[in-house]
Amino acid sequence: MDRPFDAAVIGAGWAGLGVSYVMTKAGLSHRVLERGRIGETWLTQRWDSFHLNTPKFQTVMPGDRYEGPDPEGFYTHDEFVALLEDYAKRYCLPAVTNTPVTALTRDAKAGVYRLFTPVGELTARAVVIASGSLNCARRPEVARALPGDLLQIDPSVYRNPQALPVGSVLVVGSAQSGGQIAEDLAMAGRVVFLSTGRTGRKPRRYRGRDVSFWEQKSGLFDIPRKDFVGPDGRIAGRPLLGALHTISLQSLSAQGVALLGRFTGIANGRLTFADDVRENIRLGDDVAAKTRRHIDDYITRNCLDAPPAVDDPAETVAPRLPNPPILSLDPSEHHLAAVIWCTGFEGDYSFVQVPSVLNVHGQPLENEGLTEVPGIYFPGVDFSSTRKSGIIIGIAEEAQRLVDHIIARRGDHPQFD
Ligand SMILES: Cc1cc2nc3c(=O)[nH]c(=O)nc-3n(C[C@H](O)[C@H](O)[C@H](O)COP(=O)(O)OP(=O)(O)OC[C@H]3O[C@@H](n4cnc5c(N)ncnc54)[C@H](O)[C@@H]3O)c2cc1C
């Protein structure tokens, strides 16, 4: 057997490349195995008008700093992939593209992990699984019961309004993907129904700066997981946030999007919705107001010289709700041509064949990127350690912590425990 690497990294997205950078600096022998191209998820799973909603000055990889002329602007997905490619090249990161890991197993006797790929096998003492915790769209079971001639797609497949068949479009889910896609469709003049949910929202700018600037500065991103996880172990999803400007349910309604309540299922061939649109708008407004209060308090406490608040038309516009509320839709009566399920994402870890690494839903059993299984790590998982886990700005700290752990373990435990 060839000498095992100190580590293998699965996936060349920002999480995998961020960890590889720190490993390279630390002198750890490793390879990054990527099933497609660098940044594959961003190349193949984003719509045409997509912009990252983290500003450029926060879209920085470990060791880098944004020094361009537009710190509070937003990259397109192609620009972001170019940034990742440049990063891998500049730091000579050992990324091997077009090499999917088809199985990851543990060889306890040899004290190594085995990674199988179509072009051969690689062994490593530690494995960093950075294959993406948000690159498989989730759909509710009931989607199977919809008429067979209705096109059903996920945000990862949606490209642009012109690519959809003629007719109206139902977007289910009003978080970041759902809100942004509904707006993309409405701006192209499509008839759009948006099934809303209990999702917060954030203003794009406040007191003269991008809202993410204040969140970072005031320590909001550093709040530890234990302080925002509910008693039932659940965490509220990331709020609706437009990339280039504020998006609210009321601003979407003013652009012609017909707002519906939560999708509840199918009855007698009709899609049914709860009567809770007003409640969902209120919840979004409450979360936005809380964000603004937090920023105001921070500015006051620190005696900062920030401009006064100005009204944001996306927040002050009155909602234009269907009257009476639409509680059910007949697909043929409403000329429904497509449903876009913006109902969440998860990871595909089906290649992992090491016990105690995944939960019953096939998702990572991790705590702050660490697992119970020695030598297996998960960087980049949403909300894993703090509010910034799962967004690019969080990877510098996390990568350092995980690599320190790998090095400490290498010294103490050359074999499996
Ligand atoms: C629609 C959407 C918009 C988002 N916008 C932002 C944003 O603006 N800013 C922000 O900070 N975050 C954003 N996020 C969140 C976050 O950045 C993503 O979830 C991010 O992709 C996570 O990075 P990652 O490197 O862990 O995963 P990915 O970018 O998904 O990278 C994983 C890589 O692993 C590869 N891979 C998968 N399986 C295998 C395998 N078996 N073998 C080899 N390689 C494999 C994939 O091809 C991919 O290149 C967004 C998420 C979504 C879903």
Image (cartoon, grey):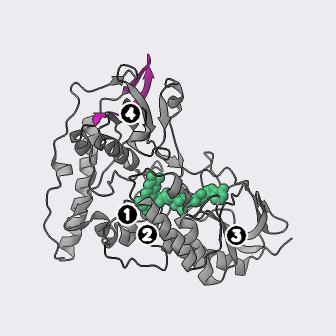
Asked if marks 2 and 1 touch (Cβ < 8 Å), the reply is yes
* Residue 60 seen in the current view: yes
Which contiguous range is marked in magenta? Answer: 256-272
Q: Which residue is mark 2?
A: 393
Up/down of 26 relative to 13, above or below: below
Label 1 environment density (alpha carbons within 10 Å; few <14, some 14–19, many ≥20): many
Label 2 environment density (alpha carbons within 10 Å; few <14, some 14–19, many ≥20): many
C-alpha separation, residue under disc 2 versus residue under disc 4:
33 Å
C-alpha separation, residue under disc 3 versus residue under disc 1:
31 Å
Tell whether 48 sits left or right of 126.
left
Q: Which residue is mark 1?
A: 54
Q: Which residue is mark 3?
A: 126
Up/down of 32 relative to 155, above or below: below
C-alpha separation, residue under disc 3 versus residue under disc 2:
24 Å
- Pointer 1 residue Cβ closer than 8 Å to ligand 1: yes
Instruction: Kindly identify the residue that appears in the image at 31 percent across and 45 percent down.
Output: 183
Instruction: Tell me the mark number nearer the camera, choosing from 3 and 4.
Output: 4
Badge 2 amino acid:
Ile
Q: x, y percentage for residue 322?
A: 23, 29
Lower position in the chain sequence, tag 1 or tag 4: 1
Q: Which residue is mark 4?
A: 170
Secondary element at image label 3: strand
Tell whether 401 sits left or right of 77.
right
Lower position in the chain sequence, tag 3 or tag 4: 3
Badge 3 amino acid:
Ala
